[in-house]
Image (tube, rainbow, N blue to C red):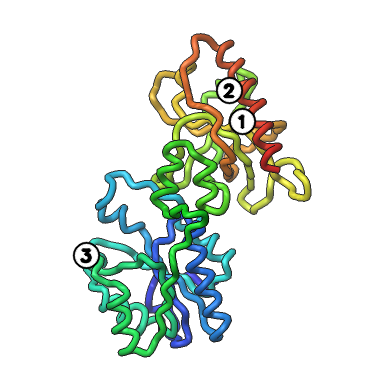
Amino acid sequence: MKIVRDNDSIDHDKKSAITVGTFDGVHLGHRQIIKELNKTKEEKGLRSVIVTFDPHPQIVLRNKAKDIKLLNTTEEKLDHFRDLDIDLVYIINFTKEFSQTHAVDFYENYLINKIGLSDLVLGYDHMFGKDREGNFETLSQLSKEHDFTVHKVSEYAPAGEHISSTEIRSALNMGDIIKANRLLGEKYSLSGTVVHGSKKGRELGYPTANIGIDSEFKLIPKTGIYAVEVRIEDENGKRFGKKFGKEFGKNFGMMSIGYNPTVTDDNELRLEVNILDFNEDIYGKNITVYFLDYIREEKKFNSLNELINEMNFDKEKTFTIINKNN
């Protein structure tokens, strides 16, 4: 997969099937669009192209929320595109100036004249350009002028359930991991580096890996305790951990997202995971946690013994969830 951020690096090829979007989460609805893109590519012998944006438009425009959080970092999104066998990803630097681009100018200057366009594949609710003026009526006229085909992908709503990045963010903010994972079509994940913490967990019999998240814009789910799958890699991609089934380096654990009110009062949000049956030194290593389910809310206990007893219950619940998921 080729990734370009400079439009001068793009080879013009009329035989291109293109889709355009932010694709935050690359959820099941997005995957229907990409599935149609790849189908068109195979049927017509085209190059598959995704045009996306960095930073996310809402980060630049702040038109929906002052502190928008995202389901994917750009690198996570690109990993999804690789897995989905995309040929070219063009990442446009989204600025306030770019946001003033009219829809027709965008399609003509970026897609038709710069990339080359045979087929345009878009979701049912696609709108683009200044004031979201670009719609399928606009594209219908353009397609006649520039000889390309427009594919409008219908909404994908299994069992009548609406799928959107907004719905998934809302579910994660409420701790509804089951719903979020269902709409994503995979486990929601967070990645970062293992950093030094207070080591309070070790004193309680539950040593934890403290995670420094890669991006300030990554959505962190609701505070509380979670059952998670854990993968740890060094700088060369080597995995740490035991072999689970046929997969090496697959670990499980309990994750705490919160402020540790029983043992601290500094009001600092911490992401910590107790990796079950694991005792290797992983400071500085890359770690990814995949959320399985929400166990309980964070709360302040009257004593450390009460906290330890509750953590023992958490561990039992985690094993139950792990067994259900494997």
Name the mark on residue 274.
Answer: 1
Q: Nearer the viewer, mark 1 or mark 3?
A: 3
CA–CA distance in space, label 1 to label 2: 8 Å
Name the mark on residue 162.
Answer: none
Report which quarter residue 67 is drawn in.
top left
Residue that label 2 marks: 201
Quadrant (top left, top right, bottom left, bottom right) of the C terminus: top right
CA–CA distance in space, label 1 to label 3: 47 Å
Residue that label 3 marks: 131
Secondary structure beneath dot 1 equals: strand
What percent of the width, then of the height, locates residue 318? 64, 31
Quadrant (top left, top right, bottom left, bottom right) of the N terminus: bottom right
What percent of the width, then of the height, locates residue 200? 55, 21
Q: Which badge, 3 or 2, is on the more N-terminal residue?
A: 3
**Is the Cβ of the residue at disc 1 closer than 8 Å to that at disc 2?**
yes
Residue shown at 38% from the left, 73% from the top? 6
- The image shows residue 113, relative to residue 218, as above or below, that is below
Give, as a three-letter code, the residue at label 3. Answer: Asp
Q: Nearer the viewer, mark 3 or mark 2?
A: 3
Q: Which badge, 1 or 2, is on the more N-terminal residue?
A: 2
Which residue sits furthest front?
159
**Is the Cβ of the residue at disc 3 closer than 8 Å to that at disc 2?**
no
Report which quarter residue 311 is drawn in.
top right
- The image shows residue 273, relative to residue 286, as above or below, that is above
Secondary structure beneath dot 3 equals: helix
Q: Is residue 22 visible?
A: yes
Secondary structure beneath dot 2 equals: helix
Give, as a three-letter code, the residue at label 1. Answer: Asn
